[in-house]
Image: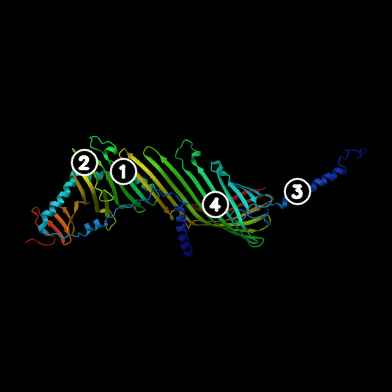
Amino acid sequence: MSVERRGRPRLIHRGARRRGGAALACAAALFGIAEASHAYHEGDEHVVDDSAWTPRGDKRWRLSLVRLDYGLTDRLSVGTYTWPWLASTPNLNVKWQFYLGSFMQWAARASLFRLDTAAFDPDSDDAPVFTLAVFEVSNSWSLGRKHELSHNLAYAAVRVRGEVTSDTLSGFGELGVTNLQYVAAYELRLSKTLALLVKGRYVLAQVLDGATDVTLEPDAFTTIEIVGSGQDARTLHAGRLFSIAPSLVGSWNSFNVRAGVGYGNYNLPGINFTLESRGFFPEFDLYWKF
Amino acid sequence: MPWLRARRKRIAGPLALAAGAGCGTTAGEAAPRPPDLDPIIAEYERPSAAFDPNGALAVSEAAQAIAGQLAALAIESELDALWNAFASSEVDSTLQSALEGSGFVRVTRICPGWLATPVANAEANGRQVLTARFTQAGLEPTVWGDVRRCRYRFEDTQIQIDTDGSEDFSLALHHDSDASGEADAGGLLVVLRLHATVDGESSDLSTDFRILDDGLEYRLERDDGSMIARWDAGGWLSLRATNGEFSCDEALACQRRGETGP
């Protein structure tokens, strides 16, 4: 160190420069490693939703606006929809990529939700209980570096059972909606940070069914019991429920955003119930991979 | 895309099966089967016995015996009370709000007993049970049920009715519609298989009759089949038989309808 020069003494000597350089090199290396684990549209990064892909690579956690997923392995993941927990609705989904080929992949996914409305009314003896199960089979085709086409067949069953007990009325009722949907998803990679994603959904069938067993006692002499069950495959206008939703997916280091506008009958995510009203709806999601 | 519409229908069927069996809701108790009243109904439409005008007295007495038994039992008022329970607003609103499907309704009514003030005591006073099935089209036409030691009063008369054990039911009601589809336009058939006790005197009442807008018809069983008898507004006995329709005056002089007198 030279102290004869006017002004501030030079504090950075050669050793420090070496350490600084090493630090920069480490940072660059780390950045390089991180970049290898990027979420860009290239390599082994794939859209996970409505496809046969699972979170893979070094970034196994995937947190979106509605869901948290974790890749136990490259071909097996578990997840949960986050918002239903706020409504005392535990849920879990498991996805297994059971076939991984060079250009074709297959996966199966199962989800289960359970909502006991007694959580909102602890004093109630007959709060209805909702149970939902969804089972999906997905197939994805890698059509070159830029194109990927996925097909999904999803079966969803919602059940609600309620019991009623009062002075003049007692019994139970069960209602269920079951539907089968086909979802196609096409991904076009425009660049490493931008992709076009087009999803089409078609409800193949939707069945409303129910059962009831109710006992009425309108007066001291009379008891009326009504036992019934029924199914109606027409009620929910099966076959006229569809949607198409193009969106752009921006991907950066570990952050993705998807935005677009869809048209048709909106499908409630997670529970896979398609609404009867038709119109435009936003497509938006953010997710982080880490 | 007609091919897709056709496939959609084929998918909906198995999906409905999957929804209804195991994956679906529980159906509860299976709907009971109603009695087969078709042979009786057919007799009212096409009587199978021939009427001999020389036997008008016997026919008249047989019809009067049935009418007298029914009057003594005040059976119409009891049927009214049961039917009103079926047609109650509670049943109607529950059926309206239930899923369009199928099932059954069972009405149990505790009989009022012999005391001046009715008491809801099934052990002491017995009960009546009526069952009807329903589909998406509504209640099926046959309502049937059972009566067990049912006690009630009519004025000062103590009456008890019970099943006679001859069939799986004690009473059955069948409401028919005419060609226009209007219910009850074809009358209400009542079939009874009862053992009745009126002020201590017992008798069997195994008969059937039809309630029309303008009166009652009684089915009279003969050796060669059945004929249908009723009294018209003027008090004349009318008979429908396989050999035609007859009208008999107060003196039981009978003429086939369409024939002119001497």
Discs 3 and 2 lie in a common subunit = no
Q: Nearer the viewer, mark 3 or mark 1?
A: 1
Instruction: Say few, some or many: other residues with alpha carbon within 10 Å of mark 4 (under 14 / 14 to 19 / 20 or more).
Output: some
Q: Position of residue A148 (x, y in %)?
A: 62, 60
Check disc 3 and report its element: helix, strand or loop: helix
Discs 1 and 2 lie in a common subunit = yes
Q: Chain of mark 3?
A: A
- Whichever of labels 1 and 2 marks the residue nearer the N terminus, that label is 1
Discs 1 and 4 lie in a common subunit = no
Which disc number belongs to residue B159? 2
Assign the C terminus of chain B to one quadrant of the image.
bottom left
Discs 1, 4 touching: Cβ within 8 Å: no
Which disc number belongs to residue A108? none
Check disc 1 and report its element: helix, strand or loop: strand
Q: CA distance from mark 4 to mark 3?
A: 41 Å
Check disc 2 and report its element: helix, strand or loop: strand
Q: Position of residue A252 (x, y in %)?
A: 68, 51
Discs 3, 2 touching: Cβ within 8 Å: no
Query: Is residue B149 among what the camera can see?
Result: yes
Which disc number belongs to residue A30? 3
* Residue at position x 80%, y 47% in the image: A24
Q: Nearer the viewer, mark 2 or mark 4?
A: 2
Q: Amino acid at mark 1?
A: Thr
**Residue that label 4 marks:** A281
Instruction: Say few, some or many: other residues with alpha carbon within 10 Å of mark 3 (under 14 / 14 to 19 / 20 or more).
Output: few
Q: Amino acid at mark 3?
A: Leu
* Residue at position x 21%, y 44% in the image: B196
Instruction: Say few, some or many: other residues with alpha carbon within 10 Å of mark 1 (under 14 / 14 to 19 / 20 or more).
Output: many
Which disc number belongs to residue B108? 1
Q: Amino acid at mark 4?
A: Phe
